[in-house]
Each structure stands twice: as C-alpha cells, then as structure tokens.
Amino acid sequence: MSFCVACGHQTEAKIPVGDHKTRLVCTNCGNIHYENPKVICGALAIWDDKVLLCRRAIEPRYGLWTLPAGYMELFETMEQGAARETREEAEAEVEIEQLYCMYNIPRIGQIYVLFKAQLKQGLFGAGEESLECRLFEEHEIPWTELAFPSVEHTLRHYFEDRKQGLFPSHLETLGTRLDQTG
Ligand SMILES: [Zn+2]
C-alpha cells in the first residue's frame, strides 16, 4: 500500500483522466504521483591530458572506477550538478567547458549528462563516496575495472576525439544490464 506524499492518505493505481498510463492517485486529494526518469550529471575532468576517475567506496560497484557523477538535485542546473558531484566525490573544483556525452538508459529510467571540464590547478582529494581518486593517462585506464558502461563509452569517445582535437557531443542509448544504476 502506498500513501500520498501530499496528504498521507491512501493512493490507488488508476489511469487519470486524459492520461494513458496507470499512476498512483491519492484517494483524498487527487494528487497524482508521477514517476519519471532521473537525471545523472557528471564530469569528465581533465588535467594535463589526464582524466580524473574515482574508485567507488559505495555500492553498487564498490571498488570500481567511475567518473564523478550523481543524481541532479532540485534547484540546480546540470552544470552545477556536475561540478557539485565532482566536489563531493573528488574534492575537486572544475571549470565546465562543454556538454559532451548524453546517454538514454530507458531500461532503468535514467539519463546521463556528462560535461567535459578542466580540473582547476590539478587539485583533488577523495570524498566520502570514494576510496581514492586518480588522474589517468590513456594507457593507464583500468578498462576492466570501470563501474558503468557510461564511463567506458565516455572515455572511449574522449580518447578517440582527442586525436582530432574536436569534441562533438555524443548521444547514445545504453542499458541492457538489469543491475545498472547511477
Ligand atoms: Zn493526497
């Protein structure tokens, strides 16, 4: 049984008038509890031709390497979200340069938005959600220990694009794995 987030009364599953999907609707105030995809923002932070990765100190994918990224908060922009996540996970300040990679992951209702960014002064630490953070050159990337397909795709795009010195935005649809999360 579910309860209304607005008034605490019981909800029922039904198709609201003019809608086409079943929603949880409050039997008291009529509040409709929409469930929509979540946006995950992150940064591909670069310093001196190296990329910043964080080794996860949390599940899922504990111990694997990821780009600093996480759920967007209310009242912030995607760029702010990417910078905040980088601050939280890597204790690093970044200059957001451009929108770089976007991934639809419809299977789990997620949208990833990754920005290319400059790590300021090459400074970073390791936030609470990270066991360690490190700058990697291309040949050092731990390809078999990356946490998510989105991380691997973004790194592959980056090293490929870097050869031309051009960084167009990439949009892809990922997600055949059941257990993939942000
Ligand atoms: Zn209600």
Image (cartoon, helix red, strand yellow):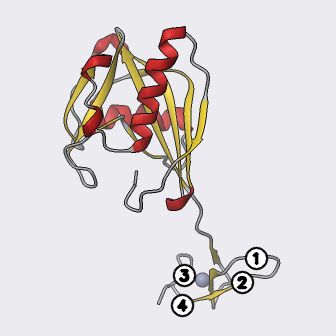
**Number of numbered discs visible in the structure rendering:** 4
Residue 1, position as x, y percentages in the image? 47, 90
Residue 31, position as x, y percentages in the image? 65, 78
Q: Is mark 3 within 8 Å of ligand 1?
A: yes
Q: Examine the rendering and report whether any part of residue 157 can be seen.
A: yes
CB atoms at circles 4 and 2 under 8 Å apart? no
Q: Nearer the viewer, residue 23 or 101?
A: 101
Q: Amino acid at mark 2?
A: Ile
**Dot 2 corresponds to which residue?**
15
Name the mark nearer the viewer: 2 or 3.
2
CB atoms at circles 3 and 4 under 8 Å apart? yes
Task: Decide which of tag 4 and tag 2 comes sooner along the chain.
Answer: 4
Q: Nearer the viewer, residue 112 or 76?
A: 112
Residue 93, position as x, y percentages in the image? 36, 23
Residue at image x 34%, y 32%? 87
CB atoms at circles 1 and 2 under 8 Å apart? yes
**Dot 1 corresponds to which residue?**
20
Circle 3 crowding by C-alpha within 10 Å: few under 14, some 14–19, many from 20: many
Circle 1 crowding by C-alpha within 10 Å: few under 14, some 14–19, many from 20: few
Q: Is mark 1 within 8 Å of ligand 1?
A: no
Q: Identify the secondary structure beneath mark 4.
A: loop
Residue at image x 49%, y 26%? 157
